[in-house]
Image (spheres, grey):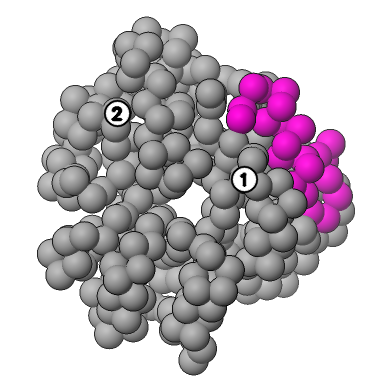
Amino acid sequence: MLIDAHAHIYEYLRPYGPFGEGRAVGKGRLRWPDGTEEQFFPPEYGDTGFAAESLLKVMDENGIDKALLLQSQNYGYQNDYIFETVAKYPHRFTGCCIFDPYGRRAMELFRYFVEEKGVKIAKFEISETWGLSGIHPDLSLDSHVFMPVFEYAAQKDIIIVIDTGMRNSRAWQVYPLLRVKARFPNLRIVLAHALFPCADGFNETRLSMLREIADGNTWFDISSVFGGEKYPFTGTQEFLRKLCDIVGTAKMMWGSDAPGALLSEPDAYRKKLNYLRDGGLFSAAELEDIHYRTASSLYGM
C-alpha cells in the first residue's frame, strides 16, 4: 500500500496572495496581474485546472492507493471541490479545509467544515512567498487571531498541517509554534516539507531546530524537501536519514506535492516516490512507515 500524504487538485487555478491575483490562461499556465506568466503544472494533465481525475491518473500510473488533498493560496482555495471529490472517491482521497483566520467569519467557517462537512484536517499555508504571512505581515501563530483556531482544533481533535515557508522570512514561526504546542499539548501538528531543510543546505542547525520541535504530537511531511537537487537526491536522503534517527519513521510521511512537483524533471513523480527505496538508507519496515503506515494511522486513511 502507498499513500501520497501531500497532493493538490484544483477545479480551476485561481490563486490570490502576495503576488496579487492569478488567472489561468491555459495549458497549465498562470498569468499574474503584472503580466508575467508561470507554468504551474504539465499541460498534458489539464488546461486551466488540475482535476481529481488527473491526479488519479498519476496515482494509478505509479501504484498509489490513496492521497491526502491539501490546499494552498497559490492554487486558490478549493474547499467545495475537495469535499465533492472526497465524496465521489471516498476510497482514494481524504481532504482538508483551508481558510484565512483573519477573516470575519473564520471560526464560523471552521466550525461548519468540521461539524457539517466532517473535516478532520485543516491546512495553513503561512509562507511569505505564497501564503498568509505575505498578506498579513504581522502574522504570529501564537497571536489572538490563531488562538481560537488552535483551541477549537484541540477540542475537536482536528489535525493542523502548517507550511512555514522558508527560514529568515516572516513565515518562520517555529518559536511561536512551540508556545502554541505548550498551551495545547494534545494538539496534533504536521509540519509540511519538514521545514524546508534544503534552504539551509541540510545542515546540523536545521536538524537541531527539528529536534527542538519534535515531540509525541508532531509529525513531518517530507514532500518537496529537495531544493535544487536532481534524482537521486543524495543530500536529501542523507538528511532524512538523520531526521529519522531523531524522530523515527512513525513520525515521517512521504508526499509528492503534485502537480507542481511534476514539472521539475522527466518522470518526476516516479523518481520522487522511489528515491528513498533506491538509496538503501532505510529498511523495508521504515519505508512502509514513510510510504503508508504513518499517514494511514494519523489521517485515518
Measuring 52% from the left and 17% from the top, which residue is drawn there? 274
Name the amino acid, label 2: Thr
Residue at disc 2, secondary structure? helix
- Tell me, yes or no, whether the two marked residues, 2 and 1, touch with CB atoms within 8 Å: no
Q: Mark 2 points at which residue?
A: 249
Asked if residue 32 lies left or right of residue 264, the reply is right
Measuring 41% from the left and 21% from the top, which residue is drawn there? 288
Please say whether residue 144 is one of the residues in the magenta stretch. no
Q: Residue 217, image x and y in percent?
A: 23, 50
How dense is the environment of label 1, judged by Cα within 10 Å: few (below 14), some, or many (20 and up)? many
* Residue 95 figure quarter: bottom right
Spatial CA span between label 2 and label 1 = 22 Å
Measuring 30% from the left and 44% from the top, which residue is drawn there? 219
Q: Name the mark on residue 93.
A: 1
Name the amino acid, label 1: Phe
* Residue 193 figure quarter: top left
Q: Give the range drawn in magenta.
A: 43-65
Q: Which of 77 and 120 is in front in this view?
A: 120
